[in-house]
Amino acid sequence: MAETHEDTPKETVHKEEEEEDQSFEELGVDARLLRALIKKRIEKPTPIQRVAIPLILEGKDVVARAKTGSGKTLAYLLPLLQKLFTANSDRKKLAPNAFVLVPTRELSQQVYAEVKSLVELCRVQLKVVQLNSNMLANDLRAALAGPPDILISTPACVAKCLSCGVLQAASINASLETLVLDEADLLLSYGYENDIKALTPHVPRSCQCLLMSATSSADVDKLKKLILHNPFILTLPEVGNHKDEVIPKNVQQFWISCPASDKLLYILAVLKLGLVQKKVLIFTNTIDMSFRLKLFLEKFGIRSAVLNPELPQNSRLHILEEFNAGLFDYLIATDLSQSKEKDEVPKESIVGSRKSRKHAKIKLDSEFGVVRGIDFKNVYTVINFEMPQSVAGYVHRIGRTGRAYNSGASVSLVSTDEMDTLEEIRSFVGDDENKGTNSIAEFPLLTKNAVESLRYRAEDVAKSVTRIAVRESRAQDLRNEILNSEKLKTHFETNPKDLDLLKHDKILSKNAPPPHLRDVPEYLLDKPTKEAREMVKLARDAMGNNNRRKGSKRKLRKEGDPLKAIYATASSKRPHKARKTGGSDSLNSSDRHKHKKNKGI
Ligand SMILES: Nc1ncnc2c1ncn2[C@@H]1O[C@H](COP(=O)(O)OP(=O)(O)OP(=O)(O)O)[C@@H](O)[C@H]1O
């Protein structure tokens, strides 16, 4: 095991403040990787990268805890690649030199894509493979022939490789130089404990072990004991042990009180009136609800895609790719960690599919995960259409926006039944009126009048989205995706960059959406809503409709995010106590005055 040491969070704080302007070069990153980072427009290291990279380059075992979106992936990938670039090519290699183990396939794909792009940009010959436990033993064997330099996979797949003799314990022991457990706080809760235990006896003592995690938990401690000996513990002060600092500071959090039966109406108002910035990631707790929402929104001309664990893997990856590439603005993701709907797809949802007849039932993919780790690109707004059932669920959902140095917002629709959850979240994230930290403020831009103006249309359309319509659409979508999945597989093998083949935000309703529902007539909008809408539009324009654009980002950081300026007053004006019912307050004239004056927070 690598040389070890125990660092204290306090020492890390000191170091970070002192060296805030350190460049990647000063951290000791290789010239090829520096050039790759420039091409990727990554200019300066994030705090966790500043602290972790030098230690990992020195060969230390490291446990790195830093909040979601803080750049943990590059924190371990850069030194890992550098180590492989400079390794002696004559050394014995019977198995991959590095294992990167992650909890979900989506994440495995994401890390793989990141490694591949870095390796290509560096023009270095390194073989990287990504495996999953659905692969046949022969395919696993073929992929591991060589063997590759880096294996990216889930613990279950490595355990499978060991048990079916595709990977030999002795070969791992002779060759493994680096073991990374990414999203370590999740690995055990995904049920990988035995898989990890199957691997650990074969990890050589000389192997450098890295544990990356967004939160500290008993599970991380357990893994630490299982794998590492006296590692450096890096807990970023800004994330750190303080429970009130788990949400990135650049994410503004809002909530809207609304009856459960009015949620469709409220989300329609928020989206249709243009009160939030795109792209928007919407979380539901069940697959049926995601289809209900999709069908409802598409009647109003709002096209969205759904992402859930019953879809074939190729489709899921393609949906993520398309969303990240900006091909559509609204993605409805089902966070099944919050749901009882975990075990199987209901049979009726797959009736008629050729595959369904063959297999009778389709298991949901247990390696699916949309909440943790996935780097959704340029998501500005996260909407909790249904509240997560745990504080951790909330933290990880919100973490899909405000990634790295970007800003973002979250809006939670909270029904009476979910009010206790909101209170629990508030007390956990340290929503403190006096400190102004991490406040979850009432969403300031949606007025009661604006909601009521859409009620008649919304209720009418909601009635037409029946349970049967939902089930049929879900079945149809699954059938389409199963067929598409095969096409995608072959197509993307030959055209990896072609993202336009299949659109995932296609309309599922049998009847085309009525044209009169596409636009909200001016007479339905009250004055505050028109003003709020205009302000969001102005902010969007000022941000070039994309706050990640080159140039504009730098400008924004300097001058403040215009959307923050809009929200600022409302954020500081928290309701005294979470109300149990009713909509948001209207903007009064002094609020509006302040909105205009405020130059950002
Ligand atoms: N130094 C940097 N400067 C700017 N952007 C960066 C930097 N490092 C990483 N990023 C970008 O920040 C985003 C988030 O990074 P990453 O996925 O590694 O976060 P994370 O800490 O692993 O989050 P999570 O815990 O949610 O998985 C990515 O899009 C990544 O490309």
Image (cartoon, helix red, strand yellow):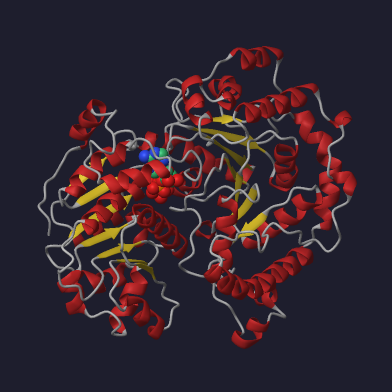
Locate residue 95 relative to residue 587 in the image: left or right.
left
Q: Position of residue 42 (x, y in %)?
A: 40, 40
Position of the N terminus by quadrant: bottom left
Vertical comparison of 172 with 115: above or below:
below
Quarter of the image for residue 378 reads: top right
Residue farthest to the front, as pictured: 123
At horizontal 13% and vertical 56% (from top left) the residue drawn is 229
| Quarter of image, res 109 | bottom left
* Quadrant of the picture in which ligand 1 is shown: top left
Q: Nearer the viewer, residue 14 or 225?
A: 14
Q: Is residue 398 above or below residue 288?
A: above
Q: Is residue 155 left or right of residue 510?
A: left
Q: Is residue 601 visible?
A: no
Q: Is residue 591 left or right of residue 15?
A: right
Q: Does residue 267 appear in this view?
A: yes
Q: Is residue 424 above or below residue 576?
A: below
The image shows residue 236 at horizontal and vertical percentages of 29, 38
x, y percent for residue 70: 38, 41
Q: Is residue 414 left or right of residue 429?
A: right
Q: Position of residue 96 (x, y in %)?
A: 26, 70
Total tally of numbered discs in the picture: 0
The residue nearer to you, when weighing 304 against 394, is 304
Quarter location, residue 336: bottom right
Q: Residue at x 47, y 25 (%)?
A: 557
Name which residue lies at 60% across and 75% down.
Answer: 486
Q: Is residue 455 above or below residue 597?
A: below
Q: Residue pushed farthest bottom?
A: 358
Relative depth, front residue between 217 and 295 = 295
